[in-house]
Image (spheres, rainbow, N blue to C red):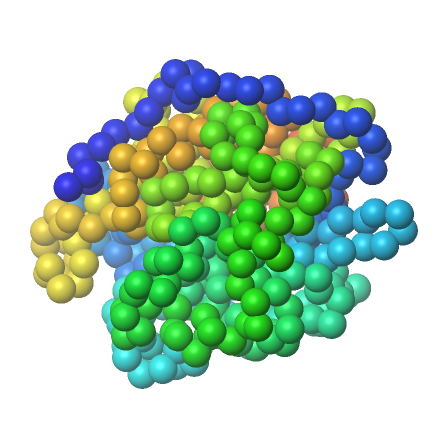
Amino acid sequence: MSAHAHHVDPLSLPFVPIPASTSPDAVVKLTLLHCGELTARRVMFRQRTTLAEMAEPEMGPIFAWVVEKTVEGRTEKYLWDLGLVSDFKKFGPEMAAASEVMASINIPESAQLPALLTNLSPPPATPDTLTGIILSHAHPDHAGTLNEFPASIPVIAGPGTKAWMDSTPDAEKPIPPWVWSHPDFIGEVGDEGAKGKGKGWQKVGSFEAAWDFFGDGSLYLMQAPGHCPGHQVALCRVSTSPDTYVLLGGDTCHSRHIYTPFPTPVARSDIACWAHPAEGPAGSTKGTHTMHVDVAEAYKSIAKLTRMEMEANVMCVLAHEGELTEELGFGIGEMKQGWEKWKESGWKKGKEKGEHPQPKY
Ligand SMILES: [Zn+2]
C-alpha cells in the first residue's frame, strides 16, 4: 500500500509559465462561501507525532466558491463545490450513522447551500441565476446539497468521476445515489456539454492537464489526482496588470501545513495516517487510513500545489484551510469578496511568513 509515500520536491517538477492575459476582461470574480465546520473525531487531516495527539479532534471549515465570468455585458455564474448538508440524516440512516462515527458538523440551515446564497447580502448568485455547478470532486462535503438545486442546472466534474460513481454499488457510493442522479446533466470536463470554450488539455504551471474553460485563461480546470477519482483544482485569474491568480485547491490536501512552507519538504507536515474507529479507540493504535485513495499520487499533486504557491502572483486556498477564516475575518454563513485585490491587500503575507492562526472552536 502506498501509505508510505512521501513528499515530492516541488522544484523537481516541470513548470510551464502561466500564459499572460491578453485582455483586461480575461478574469473571473470570486466569492468565497463559508458553508460550516466539520470536526473529525480524531486527527485525519495532518499527521501529528504521538498517538495521544492523533486522538484529538481536528476541525476544518467547509468552503465553496461563486465564480463569475462577464463576457460582453453578460455574466455567467458557477458554483465551485456545494458544501455539506446541515444534518447527516439527510443522507439516509446508514450513511448518517457512518458519518456520525467519523465527524460532527456545525452547519446551521441558513449556512447550507443553496439557502446560504439568498441569506447573503447582496446574494452573490441565486439558484435561478446559476449557469452551472463545478465540483472539485464527488465527496459529500463538496456535493452534499446537489439535490436541493434545480435539476436543470448542469453539473461539471473532473474526468474519471462518472466511471467511479457508476462502478460503485449504490450502498457504497460516497454520495447517496438519489443525490448524484438528481441533475439532468452531469458531464466531465472536455465532454460534449462540459467543454466550455476549452479546446484541449494543456500544461499550465506545474499541472500537466489544464482545461481553459472560458477560452481566455481566466479559469483553468486542472486534474489533481490522488484524493479520489476525478479530483480537480481551479486556477482563477482574478486581476490583470499585473496578472494574479487564486488556485482553488479542493482536497489536494487538508491542511496548509502539508503544502507549505517551501521549498524544503522536511518543514511540511505529512498527510495524516489514522486509525478508522473500526481499528480501535482513538489513540489506541496507529492505523492505516488516509484521506486519499492513492497517497503517492496525492503527494505529487501536493507538490504541484506547493510549486504554484511559490509563484508570487498565485495564492492557493484549500477547501478546508481553516487559517484563512482567522486571517480574513469571516465566519460560518458569511462570504469573502475582494479576491481581485488579494495581493495588494496582503492576504498571502502571513502564510509566506509562516504565521498560521488556528481557528477557534
Ligand atoms: Zn473535503
The quadrant in which the C terminus is found is bottom left
Residue 173 image offset from top left, x and y in percent:
33, 68
Any part of residue 246 in sight? yes
Does residue 269 lie above or below 170 as drawn? above
Residue 121 image offset from top left, x and y in percent:
77, 65
Depth check: 354 or 127 in front? Answer: 127
Q: Quadrant of residue 141?
A: bottom left
Left/right of residue 344 with respect to residue 231 in the rendered view = right
Which residue occupies the extreme right position in the image? 73
Identify which residue is drawn at 53% across, 63% down.
Answer: 186
The quadrant in which the N terminus is found is top left
Left/right of residue 8 with respect to residue 277 in the rendered view = right
Identify which residue is drawn at 10% across, 61% down.
Answer: 280
Any part of residue 63 in sight? no
Q: How many marks?
A: 0
Identify which residue is drawn at 37% across, 63% down.
Answer: 165
Q: Quadrant of residue 199?
A: top right
Residue 337 image offset from top left, x and y in percent:
72, 49
Does residue 338 lie above or below 109 as drawn? above
Identify which residue is drawn at 55% across, 31% down.
Answer: 202
Which residue occupies the extreme front position in the image? 192
Does residue 115 lie above or below 258 as drawn? below
Depth check: 191 or 215 in front? Answer: 191
Residue 93 image offset from top left, x and y in percent:
31, 83
